[in-house]
Image (cartoon, rainbow, N blue to C red):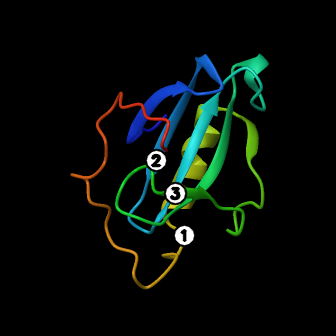
């Protein structure tokens, strides 16, 4: 699987994992595996498309309006996650104002906050 911008324990399950991805088009993904996620019992992943609305990695909301899906996608292998990340990265920019993310504003790997 691709290297995420951020990897951290999932807040619903300290033994779970969340990987955040952010792309220059203003979209990204939250990829999770925790007790309760779709596919967890089989070691598979769940993915939600994100729309970023600010310069920080925590400035996002779940996006259910892309051509890819109108919900979260579950029961995904790592190869399927990578294919979806490729598709999210090539979506048309969500607005004319979308710019490259400020990589200096993104929290380093391992950062954990209850604010995002």
Q: Quadrant of residue 13?
A: top right
Comparing 110 with 67, the one in front is 110
44 up-or-down from 20: above or below: above
Label 3 crowd bin: few (<14), some (14–19), many (20+), radius 10 Å: many
Task: Find disc 2 in the rendering and name its residue.
Answer: 21
Comparing 20 with 42, the one in front is 20
Residue 17 can be seen in this image: yes
User: Mark on residue 60?
Assistant: 3
Q: Are marks 2 and 1 in contact (CB under 8 Å)?
A: no
- Mark in the foreground, 2 or 1: 2
Toward the front, the furthest residue is: 115
Residue 81: where, in percent of width, then height?
60, 41
**Could you say whether the residue bearing mark 3 is in a helix, strand or loop?**
strand
User: Mark on residue 77?
Assistant: none
5 up-or-down from 49: above or below: above
Label 1 crowd bin: few (<14), some (14–19), many (20+), radius 10 Å: some
Among the two numbered marks 3 and 2 on one chain, the one whose residue lies closer to the N terminus: 2
Residue 3 can be seen in this image: no
Rendered residue at 43%/85% (across/down): 96
30 up-or-down from 41: above or below: below
78 up-or-down from 24: above or below: above
**Could you say whether the residue bearing mark 2 is in a helix, strand or loop?**
strand
| Marks 1/3: CA–CA distance | 16 Å
Label 2 crowd bin: few (<14), some (14–19), many (20+), radius 10 Å: many
Rendered residue at 40%/50% (across/down): 57
| Marks 3/2: CA–CA distance | 11 Å
Rendered residue at 58%/39% (across/down): 31
Q: Are marks 3 and 2 in contact (CB under 8 Å)?
A: no
| Marks 2/1: CA–CA distance | 14 Å
User: Mark on residue 91?
Assistant: 1
Rendered residue at 58%/48% (across/down): 83
Q: Please tell me how many numbered marks the rendered image carries.
A: 3
């Amino acid at each position: 699987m691709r290297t995420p911008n951020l990897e951290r324990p999932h807040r619903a399950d300290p033994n779970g994992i969340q990987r955040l991805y952010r792309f220059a088009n203003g979209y990204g993904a939250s990829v999770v595996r925790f007790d309760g996620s779709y596919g967890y019992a089989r070691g598979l992943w769940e993915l939600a498309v994100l729309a970023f609305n600010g310069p920080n990695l925590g400035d996002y909301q779940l996006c259910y309006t892309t051509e890819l899906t109108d919900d979260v996608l579950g029961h995904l292998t790592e190869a399927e996650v990578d294919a979806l990340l490729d598709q999210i990265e090539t979506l048309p920019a969500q607005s004319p104002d979308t710019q490259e993310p400020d990589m200096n504003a993104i929290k380093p790997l391992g950062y954990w906050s209850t604010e995002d």
